[in-house]
């Protein structure tokens, strides 16, 4: 069971799925439903401080390399297009809703980058991301439980 919890936490940290994959993985591998929610939520929330550290300290140095700069600009454009109108118009609530949507391309990675690009204060951006993550996890958790109990 510890291995399944660890894998679910790693999925929740991964940019390829976040908690949208971690929670279903844990539940379908018979991890306690509450443990799966808490572990995946906390793992997903851990991304914000890691990304802010990266964007504040390491991004500056990595932009000197052409291949990195090209990819970073591409990601920044995608995030600005996806979240730009919501963030400039709604600020905190725009980030919260953007992160909350349990669809690919939205989540804490994109929300952190968007809040960084639009120069949102860190504390405000953290809470927008955290609440958005919580609501997203709750939706995925509820849908997964409904599916899991519907298949039994």
Image (spheres, helix red, strand yellow):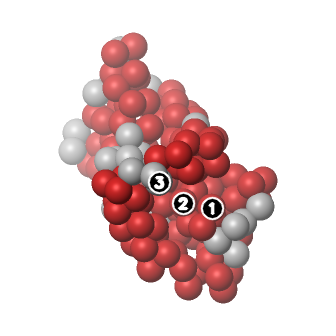
Task: Identify the residue at horizontal 28%, vertical 27% (top origin).
Answer: 29
Task: Identify the residue at horizontal 46%, vertical 47% (top origin).
Answer: 62
- In the picture of the structure, the residue carrying the numbered disc 1 is 116
Q: Quadrant of the C terminus?
A: top left
Q: Is residue 17 above or below residue 93?
A: above
8 and 14: which one is in front? 14
Question: Label for residue 113?
Answer: 2
Q: Is residue 140 above or below residue 5?
A: below
Question: Label for residue 63?
Answer: 3
Image x and y of residue 90, in percent: 68, 81
Image x and y of residue 66, in percent: 35, 56
Task: Identify the residue at horizontal 40%, vertical 58% (top origin).
Answer: 69
Q: Nearer the viewer, mark 1 or mark 3?
A: 3
Q: Pointer 3: residues within 10 angstroms few (<14), some, or many (20+)?
A: some
Q: Is residue 27 visible?
A: no
Q: Secondary structure at mark 2?
A: helix
* Total marks in image: 3
Q: Secondary structure at mark 3?
A: loop
Q: Pointer 1: residues within 10 angstroms few (<14), some, or many (20+)?
A: some
Question: Label for residue 95?
Answer: none
In the figure, is residue 124 to the left or right of 41? right
Q: Quadrant of the N terminus?
A: top left
Marks 1 and 3: CB-CB under 8 Å?
no
Image x and y of residue 80, in percent: 49, 75
Q: Is residue 64 above or below residue 35?
A: below
* Gap in angstroms between the C-alphas marked 1 and 3: 16 Å
Q: Is residue 88 above or below residue 129?
A: below
108 and 50: which one is in front? 50
Q: Pointer 2: residues within 10 angstroms few (<14), some, or many (20+)?
A: many
């Amino acid at each position: 069971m510890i291995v399944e919890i660890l894998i679910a936490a790693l999925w929740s940290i991964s940019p390829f799925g976040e908690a949208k994959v971690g929670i279903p993985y844990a539940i379908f591998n018979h991890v306690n439903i509450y443990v799966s929610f808490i572990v995946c939520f906390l793992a997903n929330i851990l991304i914000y401080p890691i990304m802010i550290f990266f964007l504040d300290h390491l991004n500056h140095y990595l932009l000197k390399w052409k291949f990195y700069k090209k990819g970073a600009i591409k990601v920044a454009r995608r995030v600005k297009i996806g979240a730009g109108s919501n963030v400039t118009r709604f600020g905190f609530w725009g980030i919260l809703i953007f992160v909350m949507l349990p669809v690919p391309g939205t989540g804490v990675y994109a929300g952190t980058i968007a809040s960084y690009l639009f120069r949102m204060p860190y504390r405000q951006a953290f809470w927008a991301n955290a609440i958005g993550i919580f609501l997203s996890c709750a939706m995925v958790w509820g849908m997964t439980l409904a599916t899991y109990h519907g298949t039994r």
